[in-house]
Amino acid sequence: MGVHAERGMSAPPEVVFNTATDPDRAAAWLPPTLRADGQCRPERSDGEMRAVWTSSAAPDWSAELVVHPENAGGSRVRLALDAGPERRHLDGLADETLDSLAREVAENLTAG
């Protein structure tokens, strides 16, 4: 994949993953190219939660999110974005995307 970003979040892994894979919340954090018709494939295995988004409208674009548990009930979140030949447009986008996801997770925690 093109670019990567990683950060910790002070929310349980299940909350982060469920927020990220909720289709109603996708517009709040996914890059615009993957929002319109982005299709999510979530997977859970051996404590790892992983989801991949692709778009038929932009076949070179994809996002992969992996969520791991971290000490004290938090999460470690890793995002990889790819845009094929348009990779140069991704500078900073992975970090911005994780910032948006963190805000959405915080909103989800306070709403629930």
Image (cartoon, rainbow, N blue to C red):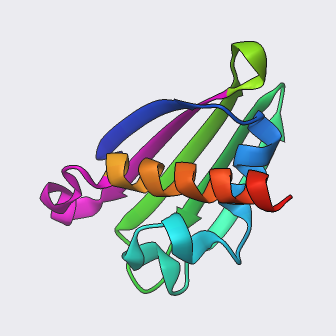
State the residue lying farthest toward the top: 71
Q: Is residue 59 left or right of residue 66?
A: left
Seen at 75% across and 15% down, the residue is: 72
Report the number of discs: 0
Q: Position of residue 8 (x, y in %)?
A: 54, 28
State the residue lying farthest toward the front: 110
Seen at 72% across and 36% down, the residue is: 11
Q: Position of residue 21 (x, y in %)?
A: 71, 61
Nearest the eye: 99 or 58 = 99
Quadrant of residue 85 within the rendered picture: bottom left
The vertical placement of 17 against 26, above or below, is: above
Q: Is residue 83 magenta?
A: yes
Nearest the eye: 93 or 53 = 93
Seen at 71% across and 13% down, the residue is: 71
Q: In what quadrant of the picture does the C terminus appear?
A: bottom right
Q: Is residue 85 left or right of residue 97?
A: left
Nearest the eye: 30 or 111 = 111
Instruction: Give the residues drawn in magenta, as a range.
Output: 75-93
